[in-house]
Structure formats: C-alpha cells, structure tokens
Amino acid sequence: LKGRVAHAARSAAQLSHHLPRAGIPGVTRGAMGVQLWMIALGLAMLLHAGCDLMAEKRAAALANEEMPMGFNSQVTLEVLLGAALALWGGIGEFKPIRISDSKKVRWESLHARPEFHCYSNRAKLIRPLLKANMPTPPTK
C-alpha cells in the first residue's frame, strides 16, 4: 500500500507541470493580473452596442425616418461599461520604479563622461542681436 501511495504522489508531481499556471495567458492571476474574460466581455459589449446602432439605423431607413443625432442611452451606457471593463481587464501588474536600487551600472551611463559635458553654448551671443532687433514688450 505504501508503494502505491508513493507511486501516486510521484505521478501527481510529474503531471503537475501540465496544469495551468499564472503565467499562461487566459488564466487569471489574482486581483491585478491580465484577465482575458474581462477583456472579452468588454469587447462583446462594445460589439453588441455597435450592432444595436446598426439595427437602429436600418430600422430608421426602412421607416423613411431620419436617424436621430443623439445615441440611445442604453447604447451609450453599454459602450462606457464595455470600454471600462475591457480596459480594467487589461491592466497588468503594477511594479515599483526603482532607479536608485540598481547595484550594477546601467547601460545608459556606461560610457558617460561628465567631465566633457558642456553647459555653456553659443546662444549667449544671440542675446545682443535679439535686443537690437526685437521690440520691447509693453509694461504696465
């Protein structure tokens, strides 16, 4: 009996790599992961709102009426909720920005030579030309 239990435990451990993980798309990852069901539901709501608008336009054309300028309140609400749901489902993990925590030198600063940075330029020579040629602004 002990041998069978040990064999079943080994088999379960070997098969566990076939189970879905949080890194696989479509599998929800807690509160703040990409959740495809929310994205799909939001897109379905947007598609349904578009179909409703097309049906409303078709019905107005068959009745020889002019299409109203505003949208139906149900369509507007469905578009807003669908867009919000799809955007919320697409939010991924928030990660902190840590610039000062870097232990190794970043690639941007590998070849930086602060001794050669020049902070004075030739723009200071333009000031006398601007003063001579530009009118002075009015004062109060």
Image (cartoon, rainbow, N blue to C red):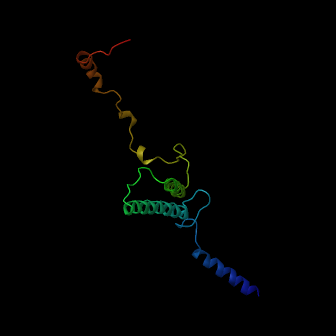
The extreme right residue here reads: 1
Quadrant of the frame with the C terminus = top left
Q: Is residue 100 above or below residue 75?
A: above
Question: Which residue corresponds to the image point at 41% horizontal and 45% vertical from the top-left?
Answer: 108
Question: Which residue corresponds to the image point at 41% horizontal and 62% vertical from the top-left?
Answer: 59
What x and y, as percent, mark residue 74?
A: 52, 56
Quadrant of the frame with the N terminus = bottom right
Question: Which residue corresponds to the image point at 36% horizontal and 59% vertical from the top-left?
Answer: 64
Question: In the image, 74: left or right of 16?
Answer: left
What x and y, as percent, mark residue 71?
A: 45, 52
Q: Quadrant of residue 65?
A: bottom left
Q: Is residue 90 visible?
A: no
Q: Is residue 133 visible?
A: yes
What x and y, as percent, mark residue 88?
A: 54, 55
What x and y, as percent, mark residue 17?
A: 58, 74
Question: In the image, 40: left or right of 15?
Answer: left
**Image mark count:** 0
Q: Quadrant of residue 132?
A: top left
Q: Quadrant of residue 6?
A: bottom right
Frontmost residue, 26 versus 40 = 40
Q: Is residue 119 above or below residue 107?
A: above
Frontmost residue, 64 versus 19 = 64
Question: Which residue corresponds to the image point at 76% horizontal and 85% vertical from the top-left?
Answer: 2
